Image (tube, rainbow, N blue to C red):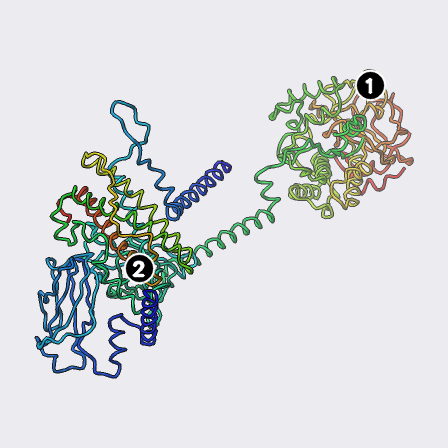
């Protein structure tokens, strides 16, 4: 029975509820009311009750379509506080008729206690439906205050940024005491768009918004509610966030690019300069070390230690192969000065010293030729590789011969020309044909010649002081001719081999005592001209016809002026004690000298020179005369 | 040096993950959280305490966390139940379940003005009364929900969790009373109010309505507990500006 009753009740209830389901959603109270009075005029009803701080609350009512009840006081609000079963309906403690509001202050507000509201008219009409609630469930907190934002950072691309938004809890909500636990919800949107972006709810008073775009304006507002409750408060006033572009960062980027490219370009330029001027820079930074270089000698010989060849060259086997005279030699310096035994002794100006040195050198001539060569050669070269012009020896030789021979003005000019061209001589431009110059006459009469009195078996040469050894004019002329030839043949530079082939002279020393002629080997040993200044009038008879080119190594560089054309078969007549003057040339082209009777006339005597000699006071042969000489 | 950096980064990541997992564990398995604090640790005079001690402030903070969580879960359970079982037109009744609640008879302040007037001791005792009065009804609720056919597991889990948490909350409040008020152990007087008669099987609708009422009332009381505890904390830290 009870079961059937309960089941019927249940069915009825279900039917009613199903009917109610058809109505529009809304507050429970309103929905029921609407369903019932969907067609009837709207009754006065309580619109809403709201609490802002969980300490007080307000209720609003509406007269509905019953406009006659809209006047203040026509409708009265009653509430029931269900604290105990014996509770009674009480009237609203405070009316605010302007708002149709009923305000419940702190004394009349109880939390966790159900309230029911009721509207009554003057004539005690009760209206259906109660509006019941508990205060904590109707709490809608005020919106937070002091909403502002700060920029956190900007993305590396400079297009988006992050913002930190912070605020204060609503002052009406007693959050600090813990009376209300509030959580906040931030919403933002771009300006002039309709949809809001909502961030996650959280109870803290700050929140970060990520990914905002530069240049766009954003609108942000916030609302809050009690934690674990459903009713939100009102939204706060919106704030606007906008960040414009930052030009400084933009401009810094190309500036750095420009700097980087500039530096790279400068570096490339420096590299190019270094590479192009490499040799010059290397010269400046690392000057080359002077290599051991001897004028006229191939450095290869020095390297490989071919001493024999070296000796040959140095001893004068090659005429003019080793130019030994420095540039300044041809200036107005006494011949004696050039003669130096020691390299350190730069100034050997005294004749006595030179004489002694010469004699000593001649006597003690057992040293290697290269030694003498190196000593007596004041080369002013700073060590530049092959800086010494190989043509210099020719020039020097020529100059020396020119200065040796007194003389012809043309020769002088030539010599002077040669002197001029000494610095940068062109081989093809040497018009030195007549090298007979009357140059510095001073040293002609100086100890240029010395008569070798005897040659010792050990190789030493005994010079007789007071005698002067002169080179015959024909000899010099031959020399000149050959020199000229040599010069003409020269087309390349540094061809010492050519010189050796073409300029081969041999120093002939005649023993006035009749010990015989000096051989080739003897001649080699003669290193320096005798320095005894003896104005002698003796002449040396030579054999000009035997001008053969022989590679003869000169003992010294300064030996070249004394190198005479000679042939191994040349036979000198018996050594004479004094110099003799060629008086005439007989039909056999032999020179007739004003010889002492014991002296036999030489088999081969040049004839031409006699003629020339007679006309010349000194008795030198000019090249043209020389040409007339024929074997 | 690089190896050291790698190891340190790895350790930090591990630590962060562990902390995260700890937080999740706190939320999902509150029992673990409660087990961290052996509330039944008995301190004896003159003997070395075996239990780790906890400061009063930390204890109060933990209790407040418990209460907040309990309220949140209860609110979720109520909403879930309401959606599942309660027809919409009857949902408004949750607002007027005031005198149907079982705790209406308890002398608990219900307005802010009243709360301002009572002492800390009375606040704590109020909380304790509330907690103790709800332990048994929640058990009943659990059994009642189990009898439903379409009760979702989430609802059941939540209610179970709430009942368990409530017990640990009671323990915490007891310890706090002992520490703060230097009172002896209050025996939990689970007064058999006889509200629930297990022998009678209620009808489905009644059961539903009763469960709905229970859940709503419990939600309200959980909020009350949380508020009381927070006010107490405020009083502890700043006496002059609090309620």
Image point (8%, 76%), residue name: A122
Q: Which residue is mark 2?
A: B212
Q: Secondary structure at mark 1?
A: loop
Of residues B34 and B136, the one drawn nearer to the viewer in this rendering: B136
Residue A424 locus on image (x, y percent): 66, 44
Residue A511 locus on image (x, y percent): 82, 21
Find residue B54 and report its image quarter.
Answer: top left
Find residue A612 and report its image quarter.
Answer: top right
Residue A381 locus on image (x, y percent): 64, 34
Chain where mark 1 sits: A
Q: Which residue is mark 1?
A: A513
Image point (34%, 65%), residue name: A3
Whether residue A540 sits left or right of residue A216 in the image: it is: right
Of residues A229 and B190, the one drawn nearer to the viewer in this rendering: B190
Of residues A379 and A412, the one drawn nearer to the viewer in this rendering: A379
Position above or below: B208 against A535: below
The nearer-to-camera label among 1 and 2 is: 2
Image point (50%, 38%), residue name: B2
Position above or below: A264 against A192: above
Q: Residues within 10 Å of mark 2 (few under 14, many from 20)?
A: many
Of residues B177 and A329, the one drawn nearer to the viewer in this rendering: B177
Position above or below: A99 against A341: below
Residue B207 locus on image (x, y percent): 33, 59
């Amino acid at each position: 029975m009870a079961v059937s009753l309960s089941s019927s009740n249940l069915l009825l209830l279900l039917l009613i509820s199903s009917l109610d389901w058809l109505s529009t959603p809304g507050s429970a109270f309103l929905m029921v009311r609407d369903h019932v009075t969907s067609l009837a005029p709207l009754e006065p009803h309580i619109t809403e009750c709201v609490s802002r701080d969980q300490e007080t609350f307000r209720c609003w009512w509406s007269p509905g379509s019953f406009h006659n009840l809209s006047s203040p006081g026509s409708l009265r609000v009653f509430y029931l506080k269900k604290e105990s079963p014996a509770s009674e309906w009480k009237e609203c403690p405070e009316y605010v008729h302007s708002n149709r509001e009923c305000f419940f202050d702190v004394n009349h507000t109880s939390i966790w206690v159900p309230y029911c509201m009721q509207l009554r008219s003057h004539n005690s009409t009760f209206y259906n439906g109660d509006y019941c609630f508990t205060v904590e469930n109707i709490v809608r907190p005020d919106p937070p205050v002091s909403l502002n934002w700060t920029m956190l950072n900007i993305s590396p691309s400079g297009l988006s940024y992050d913002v930190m938004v912070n605020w204060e809890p609503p002052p009406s909500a007693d959050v600090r005491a813990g009376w209300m636990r509030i959580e906040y919800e931030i919403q933002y949107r771009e300006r002039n768009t309709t949809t809001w972006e909502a961030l996650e709810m959280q109870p803290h008073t700050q929140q970060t918004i990520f990914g905002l775009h530069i240049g766009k304006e954003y609108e942000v507002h916030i609302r809050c509610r009690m934690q674990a409750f459903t009713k939100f408060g009102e939204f706060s006033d919106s704030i606007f966030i906008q960040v414009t572009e930052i030009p400084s960062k933009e401009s810094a980027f190309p500036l750095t690019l420009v700097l980087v490219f500039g530096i790279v370009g400068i570096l490339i330029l420096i590299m190019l300069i270094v590479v192009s001027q490499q040799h010059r820079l290397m010269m400046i930074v690392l000057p080359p070390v002077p290599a051991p270089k001897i004028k006229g000698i191939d450095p290869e010989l020095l390297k490989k230690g071919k001493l024999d060849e070296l000796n040959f060259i140095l001893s004068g086997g090659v005429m003019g192969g080793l130019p030994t005279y420095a540039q300044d030699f041809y200036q107005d310096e006494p011949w004696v000065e050039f003669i130096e035994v020691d390299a350190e002794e730069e100034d050997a100006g005294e004749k006595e010293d030179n004489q002694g040195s010469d004699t000593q050198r001649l006597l003690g001539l057992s040293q290697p030729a290269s030694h003498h060569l190196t000593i007596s050669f004041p080369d002013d070269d700073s060590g530049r590789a092959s800086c010494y012009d190989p043509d210099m020896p020719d020039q020097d030789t020529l100059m020396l011969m020119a200065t040796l021979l007194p003389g012809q003005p043309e020769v002088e000019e030539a010599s002077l020309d040669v002197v001029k061209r000494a610095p940068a001589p062109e081989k093809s431009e040497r018009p030195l044909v007549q090298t007979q110059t009357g140059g510095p006459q001073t040293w002609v009469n100086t100890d240029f010649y010395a008569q070798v009195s005897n040659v010792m078996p050990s190789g030493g040469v005994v010079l007789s002081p007071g005698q002067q050894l002169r080179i015959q004019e024909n000899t010099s002329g031959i020399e000149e001719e050959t020199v000229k030839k040599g010069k003409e043949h020269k087309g390349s530079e540094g061809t010492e081999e050519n010189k050796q082939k073409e300029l081969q002279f041999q120093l002939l020393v005649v023993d006035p005592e009749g010990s015989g002629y000096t051989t080739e080997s003897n001649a080699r040993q003669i290193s320096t001209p005798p320095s005894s200044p003896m104005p002698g009038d003796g002449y040396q008879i030579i054999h000009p016809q035997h001008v053969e080119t022989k590679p003869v190594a000169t003992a010294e560089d300064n030996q070249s002026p004394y190198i005479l054309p000679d042939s191994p078969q040349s036979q000198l007549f018996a050594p004479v004690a004094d110099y003799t003057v060629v008086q005439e040339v007989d039909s056999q082209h032999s020179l007739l000298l004003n010889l002492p009777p014991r002296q036999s006339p030489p088999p081969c005597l040049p004839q031409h020179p006699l003629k020339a000699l007679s006309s010349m006071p000194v008795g030198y042969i000019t090249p043209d005369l020389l040409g007339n000489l024929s074997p | 040096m690089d190896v050291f950096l790698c190891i340190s980064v790895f350790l930090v990541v591990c630590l962060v993950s562990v902390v995260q997992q700890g937080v999740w564990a706190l939320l999902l398995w509150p029992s673990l959280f409660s087990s961290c604090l052996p509330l039944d640790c008995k301190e004896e005079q003159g003997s070395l305490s075996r239990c780790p001690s906890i400061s009063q402030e930390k204890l109060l903070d933990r209790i407040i966390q418990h209460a907040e969580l309990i309220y949140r879960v209860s609110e979720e359970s109520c909403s879930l139940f309401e959606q599942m079982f309660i027809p919409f037109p009857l949902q408004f009744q949750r607002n007027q379940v005031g005198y149907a609640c079982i705790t209406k008879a308890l002398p608990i302040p219900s307005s802010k003005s009243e709360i301002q007037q009572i002492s800390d001791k009375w606040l704590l005792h109020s909380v304790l009364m509330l907690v103790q009065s709800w332990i048994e009804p929640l058990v009943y609720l659990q059994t009642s929900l189990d009898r439903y056919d379409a009760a979702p597991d989430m609802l059941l889990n939540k209610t179970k969790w709430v009942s368990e948490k409530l017990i640990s909350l009671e323990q915490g409040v007891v310890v706090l009373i002992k520490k703060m008020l230097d009172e002896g152990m209050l025996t939990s007087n689970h007064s058999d109010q006889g509200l629930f008669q297990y022998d009678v099987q209620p009808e489905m609708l009644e059961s539903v309505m009763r469960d709905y009422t229970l859940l709503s009332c419990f939600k309200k009381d959980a909020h009350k507990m949380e508020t009381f505890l927070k006010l107490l904390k405020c009083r502890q830290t700043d006496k002059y500006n609090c309620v």
